[in-house]
């Protein structure tokens, strides 16, 4: 199930304007170039920002996401016709052979159920060509990122063309490690509508992720630091063996 912020049409439409700085994707773009990827599977593609960045570079991209409203936004963007968009999760993909599979931002952590996580890793493995790579990030639990997710530190007011002023903030509602649940609130000044979205993320330890990858047959090539959040996130580079 997609969170309301991705599945509600009014919230999906403002997702990008509320988070315009996607410099976090620069590292993934560089890795696609580093690995010479010509075919990429973007798991949890959302509104298609990363998929379209790759398509602009001539890369063949399949974007998969369970949220129809987010995919509608993605398809409506300039160049949206160059990406193959699939609604659903990665376990329901048609047969693919890609050089690189990615899960950017919160995607890996949003897959909270252990079996769903294992199924996702297995499905990505099937989609990769021998020697292909899976790349994703996850926050280091020791850094307790959720402690900043409160109204005082997250409150913002954004003027969005065609929409008007939108107030937004986060508030943690439950911490039951490894799960953290929080509520996002959006207030539309134009008509006073208040919408909320509830999300749960799973904070996995590095050793847990490495064990999960190995159990599904991956070789772990590297665990890098996230350039946009140094010391706060792990970026995993895993590979399907060539033979």
Image (spheres, rainbow, N blue to C red):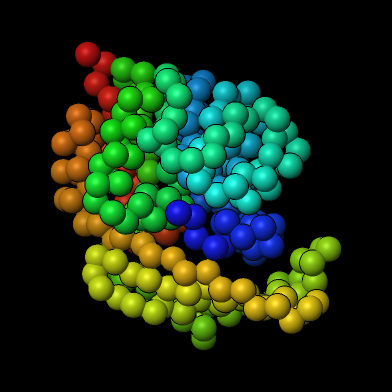
Q: Give the side of residue 213 with respect to residue 11, left or right.
A: left
Which quarter of the rendering shows the C terminus? Answer: top left
Q: Quadrant of residue 242?
A: top left
Is 27 located above or below residue 40 in the figure?
below
The residue positioned 42% from the left and 20% from the top of the image is 95
Q: Give the side of residue 8 with respect to residue 163, left or right.
A: left
Is 61 located above or below residue 116 in the figure?
above
Which quarter of the rendering shows the N terminus? Answer: bottom left
Residue placed farthest to the right in the image? 162
> Residue 156, how many percent across, how many down?
63, 77
Q: Quadrant of residue 20?
A: bottom right
> Residue 43, how many percent across, how many down?
46, 40
One can see residue 70 in this view: yes
Q: Give the side of residue 218 with respect to residue 145, left or right.
A: left
The residue positioned 31% from the left and 20% from the top of the image is 131
Residue placed farthest to the top in the image? 243
Is 204 located above or below residue 26 in the figure?
below
Q: Nearer the viewer, residue 47 or 119?
A: 119
> Residue 13, how many percent across, how many down?
69, 57
The residue positioned 41% from the left and 78% from the top of the image is 172
Disc count in the image? 0
Q: Nearer the viewer, residue 64 or 49?
A: 64
> Residue 139, how many percent across, how many down?
34, 59
One can see residue 27 in this view: no
Q: Nearer the viewer, residue 199 or 35?
A: 199
The residue positioned 33% from the left and 25% from the top of the image is 126
């Amino acid at each position: 199930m997609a969170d309301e912020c991705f599945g509600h049409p009014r919230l999906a439409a403002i997702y990008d304007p509320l988070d315009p700085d996607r410099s976090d994707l620069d590292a993934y773009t560089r890795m696609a170039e580093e690995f010479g990827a010509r075919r990429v599977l973007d798991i949890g593609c959302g509104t298609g920002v990363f998929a379209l960045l790759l398509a602009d570079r001539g890369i063949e991209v399949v974007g998969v996401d369970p949220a129809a409203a987010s995919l509608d936004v993605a398809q409506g963007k300039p160049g949206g016709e160059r990406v193959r968009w699939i609604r659903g999760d990665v376990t329901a993909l048609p047969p693919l052979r890609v050089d690189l599979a990615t899960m950017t931002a919160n995607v890996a952590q949003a897959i909270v159920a252990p079996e769903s996580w294992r199924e996702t890793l297995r499905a990505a493995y099937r989609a990769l060509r021998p020697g292909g790579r899976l790349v994703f990030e996850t926050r280091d639990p020791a850094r307790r990122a959720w402690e900043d997710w409160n109204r005082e530190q997250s409150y913002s007011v954004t003027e969005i063309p065609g929409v008007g002023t939108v107030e937004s903030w986060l508030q943690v509602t439950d911490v039951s490690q490894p799960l953290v649940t929080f509520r996002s609130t959006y207030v539309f000044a134009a008509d006073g509508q208040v919408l909320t979205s509830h999300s749960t993320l799973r904070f996995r330890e590095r050793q847990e992720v490495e064990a999960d990858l190995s159990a599904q047959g991956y070789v772990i090539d590297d665990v890098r630091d996230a350039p946009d959040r140094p010391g706060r996130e792990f970026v995993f580079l895993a590979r399907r063996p060539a033979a």
